[in-house]
Amino acid sequence: MIVSYKPSFIRQINKLEQSLVDEALDKINIFKNSPNHSILKIHKLHGKLKDKWSFSVNYKIRIVFQYESKKEITLLAIDDHDVYN
């Protein structure tokens, strides 16, 4: 899986504690190597984010992304589960 990053995603991840950054990078690597891994809890979003997807970093933090193709995604945001509410 090819992963690209929106500038807003990079700004958000740079504001996190290092331990959360490390955890997020681990989950991104899992996604790259095994996009359907159950640990990620990938799910389609609804409402104004109906064309977006997310996966969990931990119980509180998620990463919102969109598919560019079957083999490419763009990471849009990382924050708690209220990121786009």
Image (spheres, grey):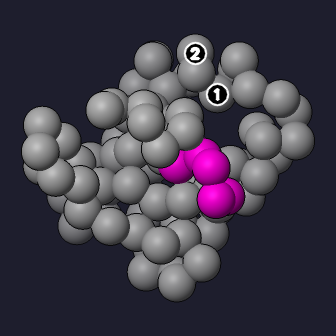
Q: Which residue is mark 1?
A: 13
Picture quarter with the N terminus: bottom left
Is disc 1 placed on a helix, strand or loop? helix
Please say whether residue 61 is one of the residues in the magenta stretch: yes
Q: Position of residue 35 (x, y in %)?
A: 45, 74
Give the camera-side residue of 2 and 61: 61
Amino acid, disc 2: Arg
The answer to which image quadrant residue 76 occupies is: top left
Residue extent of the magenta highlight: 58-62
Distance between the alpha carbons at the discs numbered 1 and 2: 6 Å
Q: Position of residue 82 (x, y in %)?
A: 43, 36
Q: Position of residue 8 (x, y in %)?
A: 45, 18
The answer to which image quadrant residue 57 occupies is: bottom right
Give the camera-side residue of 80 and 23: 80
Q: Residue at x 16, y 52 (%)?
A: 46
Magenta stretch: helix, strand or loop mostly:
loop
Q: What label does residue 11 carry, if any?
A: 2
Q: Are marks 1 and 2 in contact (CB under 8 Å)?
A: yes
Amino acid, disc 1: Ile
